[in-house]
């Protein structure tokens, strides 16, 4: 495949889920269920993913939430959603004031190019989110070893 | 006698010169597979804690001290005073007792069967991967230093031939990609020089640790060629050739690869 | 189940410390097929918990969306000397645990 064709394909892969993006933008049904009808606002949460995954089997993910993490004001939980994985709710992380810092690092599987969303539930009952796109390509050679 | 000695020396020199000319990638241009990774996987390999291959290295360290077999000996029982640093960097090599070429896996099994009265470990078994990972890790940073003289020479020649043999539906040899096209793109990936210095390695495609032979089988599968059984002479010869080809590259085990 | 944890051996009271865990587990998705075409049954670590001196300070629900040999890094406040104990369970009910002590001064 020529480089130009591949890049066009990759750009297309990013553009393709736009119709789905409109659905995923909260209120996505899963996020709506999580928030119980409460509004989910963009902000406070920062989701960091590479723009291009080395391999879809293991993508590093960093989620931070801007919060003082005091007993009066802290992150209760962080929820991670995929728009293309067979299991959309990838993980939930439960924190609390003893965390000191609302920051999670992990490695995830991503089934193809998509947008990933992280939703934080705060102690005051509000919900905040961030989303990030990622291009996930296939391995060059088939492997039946 | 002296004239014969001089003739031999001249022949060896000529052979050495011929070998040097055979190197498709000169020593100064050797690049480990990690140079062809994206930034995330390279960072993961360099993270001594989070590198998944370290799970096997740790297990190997435990197994090293665990007795196995009828004689209730552990590797450490005999090897406790001899640091294994540098050992992995010399494989594959000729096993003196049999005159055969062995890789690290086979050498471990020779110890187990001949000296410990223990069962040999299967290729790709958790234990063998752990032990080879542990041993290779002991040589971290040391340059590959295999020898191709004496009885190893014939294996080197066979490995050279195997490396340059076209095979499979795609009718490609190793040289076509890894000598002629390294650094160029194959779909979304950059073709590496195909060096063995990070094996056994944690490969994302496998989502687990695997030996160099497993990687060779994956290559064969990729070009739609028949995968030979583990432990085949052709793989061993190829391992020796690959080690010679990568001579001087530092050991990086456990590598993290796509 | 083999696992590695990285926790500082010592800290000052009130320090926010970094905690890392790497667990050896295939996190079998349930979507792969074996050599003869049969579906390999799903088996993932579905819950991971960290207790600090007996009190849960972190918990995670995991799924097949987490990579094989799962890695998680989070933070906790160094409150008192004690053990950080991790426990986890997979879909087959296999349990794993790992602990490390931390000395907290001040």
Image (spheres, helix red, strand yellow):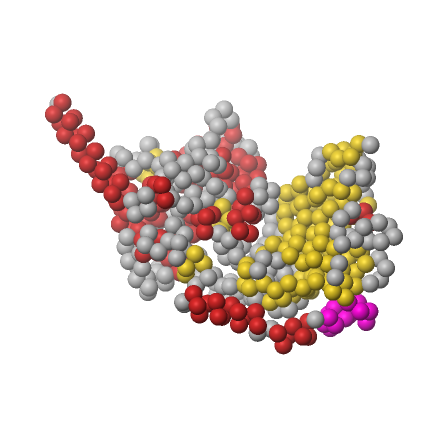
Q: Is residue A18 above or below residue C41?
A: below
Instruction: Give the quadrant of the N terminus of chain B.
Output: top left
Q: Quadrant of residue A22?
A: bottom right
Residue nearest the observer in this picture, A22 or C87 = A22
Q: Is residue B31 above or below residue A61?
A: above
- For image coordinates 81% across by 58% down, the residue present is A122
Residue C4 located left or right of residue B103:
right
- For image coordinates 31% across by 38% down, the residue present is B100
**Magenta region: which residues?**
A26-40
Residue B96 located left or right of residue B78:
left
- For image coordinates 71% across by 48% down, the residue present is C74
Residue that lies at the very extreme toward the top in this rendered image = B2
Q: What x and y, as percent, mark residue A124?
A: 86, 59
Q: What x and y, as percent, mark residue B62?
A: 57, 36
Specify whether residue A28 is in view: yes
Q: Quadrant of residue B181?
A: bottom left
Specify whether residue B109 is in view: no
Q: Is residue A38 magenta?
A: yes
Q: What x and y, as percent, mark residue A61?
A: 63, 55
- For image coordinates 80% across by 56% down, the residue present is A76
Residue that lies at the very extreme toward the right in this rendered image = A72
Q: Quadrant of residue B144?
A: top left
Q: Is residue B185 magenta?
A: no
């Amino acid at each position: 495949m020529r480089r130009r064709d591949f890049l066009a394909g990759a750009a297309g892969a990013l553009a393709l889920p736009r119709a789905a993006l409109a659905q995923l933008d909260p209120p996505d049904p899963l996020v709506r269920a999580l928030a119980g009808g409460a509004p989910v606002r963009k902000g406070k949460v920062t989701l960091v993913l590479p723009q291009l995954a080395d391999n879809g089997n293991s993508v590093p993910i960093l989620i931070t939430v801007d919060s003082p993490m005091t007993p009066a004001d802290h992150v209760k939980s962080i929820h991670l959603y995929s728009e293309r994985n067979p299991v959309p709710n990838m993980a939930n992380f439960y924190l609390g004031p003893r965390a000191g810092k609302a920051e999670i690092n992990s490695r995830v599987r991503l089934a193809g190019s998509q947008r990933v969303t992280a939703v934080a539930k705060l102690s005051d009952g509000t919900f905040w989110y961030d989303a990030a796109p990622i291009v996930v390509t296939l391995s060059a050679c088939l492997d039946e070893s | 006698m002296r004239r014969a000695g001089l003739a031999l020396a001249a022949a060896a020199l000529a052979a050495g010169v011929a070998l040097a000319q055979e190197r498709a990638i000169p020593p100064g241009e050797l690049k480990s597979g990690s140079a062809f990774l994206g930034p995330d996987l390279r960072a993961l390999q360099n993270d001594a804690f989070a590198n998944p291959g370290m799970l096997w290295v740790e297990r190997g360290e435990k197994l090293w001290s665990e007795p196995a077999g009828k004689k209730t000996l552990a590797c450490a029982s005999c090897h406790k005073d001899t640091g294994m640093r540098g050992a992995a960097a010399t494989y594959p090599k000729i096993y003196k007792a049999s005159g055969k070429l062995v890789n690290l896996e086979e050498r471990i099994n020779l110890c187990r069967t001949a000296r410990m009265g223990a069962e040999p470990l299967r290729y790709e078994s958790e234990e063998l991967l752990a032990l080879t990972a542990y041993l290779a890790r002991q040589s971290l940073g040391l340059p590959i230093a295999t020898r191709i003289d004496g009885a190893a020479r014939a294996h080197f020649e066979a490995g050279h031939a195997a490396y340059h043999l076209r095979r499979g539906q795609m009718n490609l040899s190793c040289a076509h990609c890894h000598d002629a096209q390294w650094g160029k793109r194959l779909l979304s990936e950059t073709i590496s020089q195909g060096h063995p210095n990070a094996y056994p390695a944690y490969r994302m495609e496998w989502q687990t640790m695997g030996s160099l032979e497993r990687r060779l089988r994956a290559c064969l599968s990729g070009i739609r060629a028949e995968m030979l059984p583990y432990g085949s002479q052709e793989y061993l010869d190829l391992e020796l050739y690959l080690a010679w080809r990568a001579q001087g590259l530092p050991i990086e085990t456990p590598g993290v690869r796509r | 189940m083999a696992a590695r944890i990285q926790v500082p051996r010592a800290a000052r009271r009130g320090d926010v410390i970094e905690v890392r865990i790497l667990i050896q587990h295939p996190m079998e998705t349930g979507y792969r097929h074996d050599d003869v075409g049969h579906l390999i049954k799903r088996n993932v670590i579905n819950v991971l918990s960290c207790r600090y001196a007996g009190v849960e300070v972190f918990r995670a629900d995991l799924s097949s969306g987490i990579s094989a040999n799962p890695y998680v890094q989070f933070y906790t406040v160094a409150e008192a000397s004690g053990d950080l104990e991790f426990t986890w369970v997979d879909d087959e009910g296999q349990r794993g645990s790992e602990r490390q002590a931390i000395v907290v001064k001040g």
